[in-house]
Amino acid sequence: MAKTTIRISGMSCEHCAMRVTKALSGLSGVTDVKVDLKSGTATFEKPESVTLEDVARVIEEAGYRVEKG
């Protein structure tokens, strides 16, 4: 498992953070999801089989964007 931190844009409230948490938690094997609204980041553990493209897809489906770089 690899600990990963990504930046997310478009979150403006706790409801947004909960939606992102739910989206990430729905990916198979993703655990220990922590979304920080103030910093606009999400930190989580993921297996190698889950790619950052998978992560970006579920976040975009939830209505937010993963910031690149």
Image: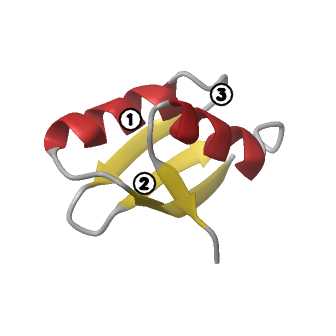
The image's mark for residue 42 is 2
Nearer the observer: mark 2 or 3; the answer is: 2
Inspect the image, locate mark 1, and give the three-letter code of the amino acid beneath it. Thr
Residue drawn at the location 34% of the way across and 31% of the way down: 19
Q: From what the image shows, is residue 69 above or below residue 36?
A: below
x then y, percent, for residue 48: 81, 44
Q: Earlier in the sequence, mark 1 or mark 2?
A: 1
Dot 1 alpha-carbon crowd within 10 angstroms: few under 14, some 14 to 19, many 20 or more:
many
Asked if the residues shown at circle 1 and circle 3 are in contact, with their CB atoms under 8 angstroms apart, the answer is: no
The secondary structure type at the circle numbered 1 is helix
In the displayed structure image, the side of residue 3 where residue 54 appears, left or right: right
Q: From what the image shows, is residue 65 above or below residue 54?
A: below
Label 3 sits on residue: 29
Q: Earlier in the sequence, mark 1 or mark 3?
A: 1
Inspect the image, locate mark 2, and give the three-letter code of the amino acid beneath it. Ala
* Quarter location, residue 41: bottom left
Extreme residue in the right direction? 49
x then y, percent, for residue 50: 76, 38
The secondary structure type at the circle numbered 3 is loop
Inspect the image, locate mark 3, and give the three-letter code of the amino acid beneath it. Gly
Q: Earlier in the sequence, mark 2 or mark 3?
A: 3
x then y, percent, for residue 52: 72, 51
x then y, percent, for residue 55: 64, 42
* Quarter location, residue 30: top right
Q: From what the image shows, is residue 8 above or below residue 45?
A: below
In the displayed structure image, the side of residue 52 where residue 36 appears, left or right: left
Label 1 sits on residue: 21
